[in-house]
Amino acid sequence: MNDTTARGNRLGLLLVGLALLALAALTITRGAGVFPQDAAPARAPLVDAPMRSAFARYDPSLRWVIAAGGIVLALFGLRWLLVQGRRRSLDTMRLEGGPAGVTEVDTGGVTDAASAEAGVHPAILGATATMIGTERDPCVRMRVNLAGNAPMSAVREQLGEVVLPHMRQALESPDMPAVARVNVEDAPRPRRTLA
């Protein structure tokens, strides 16, 4: 999740929380009869005669306004859900810019090289890498298929001591975070040949 998505989540949750807090305070004060003009008992219905007359007076326009507000809220909620599941892949990174020109790197080549370098280890059956995030905050996600009889330290050594330092050096991002998902598979059986 990038910073923009996290900031939007915090703002949205803050607004929903404030609205719910205001409704809760209104309900508690109405039920307690705090306001003098609110002399209705706690068991009085929330939709009383003035509210029913407002619906009758503005009918059907008030119902359409409420329906439109519900649709807008539903669309905001759908957009929020779609943003949560979206991972922005990073296709190019600008490494250096100046009067002489700009240096850009195709991250696909770097991730392909990292996948091939991870697969060199005999315990790793296959690997794929993807760059996500932004140019300022890049992150690498790797999927590694490990042979079932291999120790987990083999993945840590190959990724932590070889693959990731080379990627960080190539992209000039010494603090680039990395996430590796390891799948353990049965080791392939050796093939027998009959002579």
Image (tube, grey):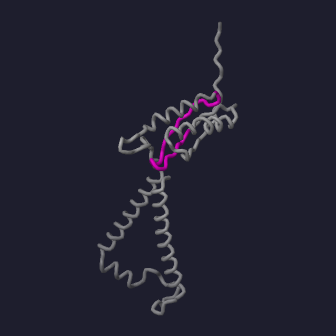
Residue 128 on the magenta segment: yes
Q: Nearer the viewer, residue 187 or 171?
A: 171
Give the number of callouts: 0
Q: Is residue 28 above or below residue 104?
A: below
**Image x and y of residue 104, in percent:** 41, 40
Residue projecting furthest to the front: 99
Residue projecting furthest to the bottom: 36
Start-end of magenta stretch: 122-142
**Image x and y of residue 31, in percent:** 53, 84
Identify the residue at image location x=34%, y=66%: 68
Q: Is residue 6 above or below residue 191?
A: below
Q: Is residue 154 above or below residue 54?
A: above
Identify the residue at image location x=56%, y=44%: 178
Identify the residue at image location x=53%, y=82%: 28
Q: Nearer the viewer, residue 183 or 177?
A: 177
Q: Is residue 108 above or below residue 35?
A: above
**Image x and y of residue 112, in percent:** 49, 33
Q: Tell me: 109 left or right of 119.
A: left
Identify the residue at image location x=56%, y=31%: 117
